[in-house]
Every structure is written in C-alpha cells, then in structure tokens.
Amino acid sequence: MNKTKQNKTKQNNYHYLLTNLFSFKLFIVVFSLILFSVSCGNDDKTGSGGGGNRVSLPDADYSGTLTRSNLIENPEGSGMGDGVFPNPANDVGIYILNGGIVGGIQGMAEAGKQLQIYQDGSGYYASGEYSTAESGMTTTVKTSIKFTISDDKMNISQYEQELIYNIPGTGQTSAKATYSGTLTKQP
C-alpha cells in the first residue's frame, strides 16, 4: 500500500514536471515569435537605413542643374572625373517613384535600382550602390543624397556620387564628385 502511494506520487511529480516543461517551452516559442515580429516590423527603422525612419514621398519628377563643389580622381589627373561628372551638371533628373529615388547624374534607373528615402531631422536622405559586370570589367556606382522639399523645389544640400571601374590587368580607376543645387518639380 505504501509502495502504491509512492508510485502515484512519482507519477504526479512527472506529470507536474512535464506540464510545466511544456508550458515553459510554449512560453519560449510565443516570446520568440513576438520578438521576431517586432524585429521584422522595425526593419525600416533600424539597421537598414543607418538611422532615421524610412518615408514614402509622393511620386514626382524634379529636374535642373547641380553645381559640382568637389571632385576626386584616382589616379589623380586621370581626366576621368570631368568626363563622368560635368560641372555644372545640366538636365539632372531625379524621380521619386513608388517611395524611392531613381535617376540622377549616373542614374540608378539604368540598373533598375532605387534608393530608399529616410527622414533625417527636417530633411531627407537616400543612399545606395549597385555594381555591374561586363566583359570582365566591374563598374560600381555609390550614391548619397541629402535634400529637402519645399513647394515645387527639391533643395539638394549634398549629392555625392562615386564611380569605380575595376579593369582586369589594369587595376582600379575611380572618380567621386559632390554636387548641390535646386531642382524644380516638373508637371
């Protein structure tokens, strides 16, 4: 009789442990799912944009002239910069399309790329890069734009773009330019 009582007590203890273990595992699973969903929900606010909140501006076309304030060539004096980054850059088109930016001086549109727009204090910024490879040569374009929008104007305080060519057997050639100016919204 005493042994039966002990066996029943053991069974109750095992049942209690298994129930608590199952509850604990269920809690861990639910908690992990909640953390994962919060992490995914904040993807546009943390990490991916380097700070700031991603925003979606209405579609618009802006065009005009930007003035170059800086040019760096590598190797220095190669003449690559002036050919790629004119001063001034006339007929620059920047298009806000589906919440991102395409176009520009060495446009992202040609590669089917779009820069995501982020809120930066009282203004906006967008940055990104793309690479293409053709006949063994790799071309990389890096773009960063800081701007504000007021009425029908896009005021660009800094438009920085770098173009890098990697040519097999020759090495790397690059040019980096900084522009600023005001573009006008097109009807």
Image (spheres, rainbow, N blue to C red):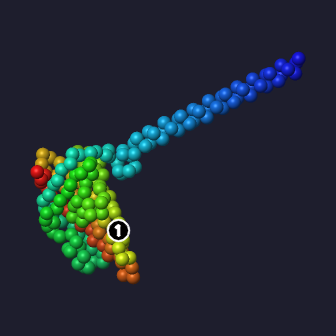
**Where residue 30 appears, x then y in whole percent?**
53, 34
Q: How many marks?
A: 1
- Residue at 21 percent across and 64 percent down: it is 105
**Residue 137: percent from the left, percent from the top?**
36, 75
- State which quadrant residue 181 falls in: bottom left
As drawn, 161 above or below 155: below
Does residue 34 lie above or below 156 as drawn? above
Q: Which residue is drawn at the image coordinates 57% and 35% (left, top)?
A: 28
Tell me if 179 is positioned left or right of 22 in this view: left
Please give left or right for residue 148 compared with residue 4 in the image: left
Q: Residue at x 56, y 36 (%)?
A: 29
**Residue of label 1:** 132
Q: Residue at x 38, y 50 (%)?
A: 48
Nearest the viewer among 182 and 58 is 58
Query: Residue 175: x percent and y percent?
Result: 27, 71
Neighbours of disc 1 within 10 Å: few (<14), some (14-19), many (20+): few
Can residue 44 be seen here? The reply is yes
Report whether 1 appears left or right of 185. Answer: right
- Residue furthest toward the bottom? 169
For numbered disc 1, what is the local secondary structure?
A: strand
Q: Amino acid at mark 1?
A: Thr
The N terminus lies in which quarter of the figure? top right
